[in-house]
Amino acid sequence: MSKDYYEILGVAKTATEEDIKKAFRKKAHQYHPDKGGGDEAKFKEVNEAYQVLGNKDKRSQYDRFGSAYSNQAGGFGGFEGFGGQGFNINMDDLGDIFGGFGDMFGFGGSGRRKRSQRGADLEVGITIPFMEAVFGVEREISFAKTATCKTCAGSGAEPGSNPETCKTCHGQGKVNQVQQTMFGRIQMQTVCPTCHGEGKVISKPCKVCRGSGQQRENVTMKVKIPAGISNSEMIRLTGQGEAGEKGAPSGDLYIKVHVTPDKRFIRRGDDIISNISISFPDAALGTKIDIETVDGPVTLKIPEGTQSGKVFMLKDKGVPKLRGRGRGDHLVEVTVKTPTDLTRKEKQLLEELKNLK
């Protein structure tokens, strides 16, 4: 049966390109072989699904023909007229539409030259306090990743030696094969089994990376956390992820920012909310009170007759806008305290006040 790439990535058939990209990153991070509990087979399966669904043209072809792959065994009627005659097929021409055709009949895959794979993305978490999220900060992070081998500069060859042209395919990366099938003799091109499509072979592998062109290393770097970043937001550093194969681009590094809360403030978007309590006389007669903001104390005038639940706005005293200019506001909600445990004198005065009304 054909593979359901949508199911593999866990997205609906109506998923947008961005949805597919996010799903791929999540799955690739989950199954990456270098992680504890990673699964190389599933990692490759997820990557295969993304190579199709992440490409607009391939996705269109998959949507049209993908579910019919397993039902076409008896449907290639156009081949019957060839009988026992030999004929040529370029598997590259069929590969995009009938992706699994060659493997189904044991052809051994297409003759496409192997492409070096882009490095995997990485995710690193960092925790910062509330105030650093408001105004930004520069932090140092450390993590391990696969990097380009410094000894061979990613070539995989021992310094002083050079990769040699493959003698099997003469540098083409593919070879011609003839196979007897139910359709007759078929001549086709397949990936060279010696160089695996590279066209070159390494006679003297690098002693450090053993010919892979990559090595694990611990990285320490400074990261600028922008002012106004929110809890769980991601910072993307292009090309700072895992190294690609044989000169292919590196993946990206995603830094997930965790912000610890502050007891004094509540953040809502770019606004900050705090609460103050005032006495009944202050609410009735009015007063001035110092309010703690992210910029320090600010004096707030409380007008006479203020009711409990009244909200005052301190303009531009909120969080700097991460994607724009200016700042949010600081909203101060007032709670009027009802006096308790009154003395006899206090009760008498309140009675007199009530009678005046």
Image (cartoon, rainbow, N blue to C red):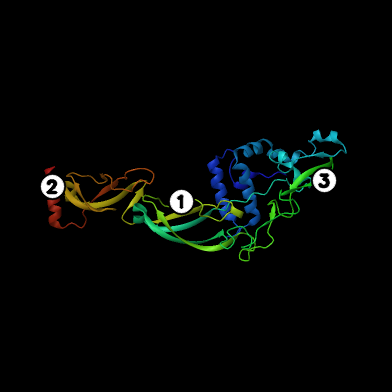
* Horizontal side, residue 123 vs residue 314: left or right: right
Residue named by callout 2: 353
Q: CA distance from mark 2 to mark 3?
A: 108 Å
The kind of residue on which mark 3 rests is Val
Q: Quadrant of the N terminus?
A: top right
Q: Quadrant of the C terminus?
A: top left
Camera-side mark, 2 or 1: 1
Residue at 85% in and 35% down? 82
| Mark 2 or 3, nearer chain start | 3
Residue named by callout 1: 234
Which label belongs to residue 178? 3
Which label belongs to residue 149? none
Q: CA distance from mark 1 to mark 3?
A: 52 Å
Please tell me how crowded label 2 is: few (under 14), some (14-19), or many (20+) other residues with Cα within 10 Å.
few
Residue 279 percent location from the top left of the image: 20, 52
Who is closer to the viewer here, 151 or 229? 151
Residue at 41% in and 52% down? 231
| Mark 1 or 3, nearer chain start | 3
Q: Secondary structure at mark 3?
A: strand
Q: Secondary structure at mark 2?
A: helix
